Amino acid sequence: MDAVVQFTSQSQGRDRIFRATQYACALSVYLLRNNSERKDLVAKLKSLETNMSAGRKLFRLGNTINSIEAAKRTMQLSDRVLSLCLTAANASRALYFICDNVLWARNVGLIRHIDKERWSLNASRCYFLSLVTSLTRDVYEVVQLMAQKARDRHFRQKMELHLNESPEVAEAVIPQLDAFLFLLLESLRSHPAVALDMLKNVCDLFIPLDRLGIYQSNAGVVGFCGLLSSVIGIVTLAQPKLRLRP
Amino acid sequence: MESWVRFNSQSQAKERIIRAAQYACTLLGYTLQNGGAAADLLHTVSQLEAHMSLSRKLLRLGNSVEALEAAKRAIHLSDGVLRLCLTISHLNRAMYFACDNILWAGKTGLVPEVDLQKWSQRSFRYYLFTLILNLTRDVYELHLLMDREARYRASKSPPSAQPSPSLSADPPSPAPEALPWLSRQLHLLVTVLYSNPPLLLDLLKNLCDIFIPLDRLGIRPTGSGFVGACGLTSSLLSIATILHPWLKLKP
């Protein structure tokens, strides 16, 4: 109970729970859409999803400043590639929050004469950009890990063992591919934080891809990906070891 | 900016800011109505207030557990009166949050059969009991501190036992004696409150807050302007205690 209370006292913890619920509702609505007996349940789930989304927009009102502060911090990192990727990610996230705040003001009725569709598309574009730069950072980290592992003598012994054990398996036909995949999987397994962050960003990517029309999936895929990424977010917040730093 | 990030990361801080904004909207709605503003502006303000109220209910969904944990901790206090007041206050707060969760479910349409009026009245009743218990605790602490201060003053300067010669001729009437006693007590009260800002803030906060359920339950209707001003003041005081944790009354 204590851990739950501590988790929910963090604003980010609550937001991730609400996000998970929101996408779970979206997924359930998609799965039940053709079920005529459950029409009122579907209506309730839709209403819950709208309420969660509206509430989360209100709670996100101050996050622009958070992102700008994070961008200022990441500008001072020693590693140039990392600094560039993270600063770009934080800056585009700050722009996303600004668009999101404008959309909130429009939804509540404080600002009347703005084009909701255009601002929504801009928000999706900024979000897409932040995800792409985050993924670039993940790929960079994985490449560095793989290079480090390849130099490690203990690992090279392990690789020899693996390559020689089953020559008749299909992968062994292309030994370089087999070696590459083995290296990749071992690197990801030894650093779960990078693997989780990569999976989270890939799942999140489907949301703006669908919204911007680049890769049209359906509402069910979007709901499932959103739910999965929210659950990963909750896990990384609850277990700080699984969180990718910086 | 750093302090904003740290402040914003606490869920309670965010809820307090939204509460301040909500009661500012109430106050604004009242002043605009009296000033004869346009109907759609009033509609926007009241819609904004309703949106913030519902979102705060969403944000408070897990607070019953927190209040129960606080009640469990309060049982172990050494002082009997404090133990009683705080434990029952936290339990009432837990019940208030439970009613609030049911109201949220009703307002969002999850459980349409909820009688919104009945549960709203219930939640305000629990909130009123919480505030009465908090005020009792404040008065008790104040009484203890005033006693201590009076004894400290008495030990510092021994009081003159003889009455002044001018009064010795007539029998002492009760009214002139009451006034110096009253002024002494008031002076003691002001000194104690001035040297204990956490107690002063908590007392002010609870006094401001108590007008909200008193108005909503119809016990002492004061009008939305006064309620808005009280709510805004208590939210600002609460934000001050979050920004400066030394201002929070412990336990």
Image (cartoon, coloured by chain):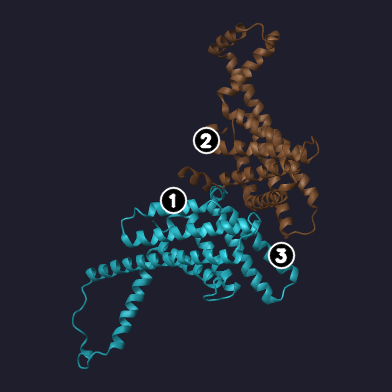
Chain colours: A brown, B cyan
**Is the residue under label 1 in contact with that under label 3 (CB below 8 Å)?**
no
Q: Is residue A21 left or right of residue A218?
A: left
Check disc 2 and report the residue beneath it. Answer: A240
Check disc 3 and report the residue beneath it. Answer: B44
Looking at the rendered structure, the kind of residue marked 3 is Thr
Does label 3 or label 1 sit earlier along the sequence?
Answer: 3
Q: Is residue B40 left or right of residue B143?
A: right
At mark 3, the secondary structure is helix
Is residue A67 visible to us here? no
Q: Classify B100 as above or below A177.
A: below
**Which of label 3 and label 1 is nearer to you?**
1
Q: From this viewpoint, which residue is outermost toward the bottom?
A: B170
Quarter location, residue A204:
top right
**Residue B133, how many percent across, how many down?**
42, 65
Chain ID of residue with mark 1: B
Q: Classify A196 as above or below A42.
A: above
Between A84 and B177, the one nearer to me in the picture: B177
For image coordinates 52% across by 72% down, the residue present is: B214
**Is the residue under label 1 in contact with that under label 2 (CB below 8 Å)?**
no
**Residue A142, how many percent across, how many down?**
63, 24
For image coordinates 52% across by 32% down, the residue present is: A241
Mark 3 closeness class: few <14, some 14–19, many ≥20 residues within 10 Å: some
Q: Classify B22 as above or below A89.
A: below
**Which of label 2 and label 1 is nearer to you?**
1
